Structures are given as C-alpha cells and as structure tokens.
Image: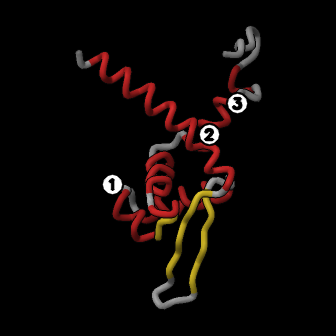
C-alpha cells in the first residue's frame, strides 16, 4: 500500500482510493452496480432495478443512475416504446471495477466469518 502524505490533507491530494469512493461510495451505487453485474447479459431495465434495490426511491435511483452514467460506469439505452423502456448496462470501464468489488466482497466475507466464530 502506498504511503500517505505526512503533512498534507489527504482530502486535498489525488488519492486513488478516495477517488474510487467518490465514484461508488454512496449508499445506493454499489447495490445498483451489483444488480446490473449479476443480471443476464449485465443489462437491467429501470423498473427491474427499482424492484431489486429495495428501499430506494425513484428520485434517488434516477440520480444515482445519472451519476454512474456520467462517470462512465454504466450505459443508458432508451427505446421509443410506450411506455418508454430504458436499459442500463456496464461500460467497459464499469466492467473493470467488478474484480475489485469481488475482492472486497471476499475480504469482508472472511472478516464477518471470523467475527461470528
């Protein structure tokens, strides 16, 4: 692991971990990414996400999806149907995030296991 700067405010540096947390560290973004990743062909419709991400409001889902799209982690494809159909999928950049999330998952799984023994 890299050394932290001794005399600088860590939040004023270009720390890669803080950058990653800025992109995915909010309450709802990881569940959204995980459900898209876990879906067939890594594509989910808006309504499917709304059902799967229990507890999220439509407003917050839309906000998170827009931010993930702006950060080039997901794609948005809208079909001209009535009612409109919108699908979300992982971008190539988003797909590169999955191994890191799987590693964090495995790490946390081990920690939880140790705490419960």
- The residue at which mark 2 appears reads as 22
Label 1 and label 2: CA atoms lie apart by: 22 Å
Compared to 90, does 85 lie above or below?
below
117 horizontally vs 7: left or right: left
32 horizontally vs 5: left or right: left
Residue that extends furthest to the front in the rendered view of this protein: 41
Q: Nearer the viewer, mark 3 or mark 1?
A: 3
Q: Give me the residue at 57% from left, 39% from top.
A: 99
Please name whichever residue, 82 or 92, is drawn nearer the observer in this view of the structure: 92
Residue that extends furthest to the top in the rendered view of this protein: 6
Label 3 and label 2: CA atoms lie apart by: 10 Å
x, y percent for residue 111: 37, 20
Please name whichever residue, 46 or 97, is drawn nearer the observer in this view of the structure: 97
Residue that extends furthest to the bottom in the rendered view of this protein: 82
Compared to 12, does 7 lie above or below?
above
Q: Give me the residue at 63% from left, 59% from top.
A: 69
x, y percent for residue 26: 51, 43
x, y percent for residue 114: 31, 16
Compared to 101, does 87 lie above or below?
below
Q: Give me the residue at 57% from left, 35% from top.
A: 100
Answer with mark 1 or mark 2, whichever residue precedes in sequence. Answer: 2
Label 3 and label 1: CA atoms lie apart by: 30 Å
Give residue 16's mark. 3
- The residue at which mark 1 appears reads as 55
Tag 1 near tag 2, CB within 8 Å: no
x, y percent for residue 34: 46, 49
Answer with mark 3 or mark 2, whichever residue precedes in sequence. Answer: 3
- Helix, strand or loop at disc 2? helix
Q: Is residue 67 visible?
A: no
- Helix, strand or loop at disc 3? helix
């Amino acid at each position: 692991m890299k050394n932290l700067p001794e005399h600088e405010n860590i939040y004023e540096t270009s720390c890669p971990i803080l950058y990653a947390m800025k992109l995915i560290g909010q309450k709802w973004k990881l569940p959204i990414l995980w459900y898209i990743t876990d879906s067939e062909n890594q594509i989910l419709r808006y309504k499917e996400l709304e059902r799967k991400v229990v507890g999220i409001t439509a407003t917050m889902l839309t906000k998170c999806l827009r931010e993930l799209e702006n950060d080039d982690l997901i794609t948005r494809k809208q079909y001209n149907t009535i009612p409109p159909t919108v699908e979300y999928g992982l971008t190539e950049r988003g797909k590169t995030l999955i191994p890191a999330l799987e590693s964090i998952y495995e790490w946390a799984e081990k920690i939880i296991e140790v705490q419960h023994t």
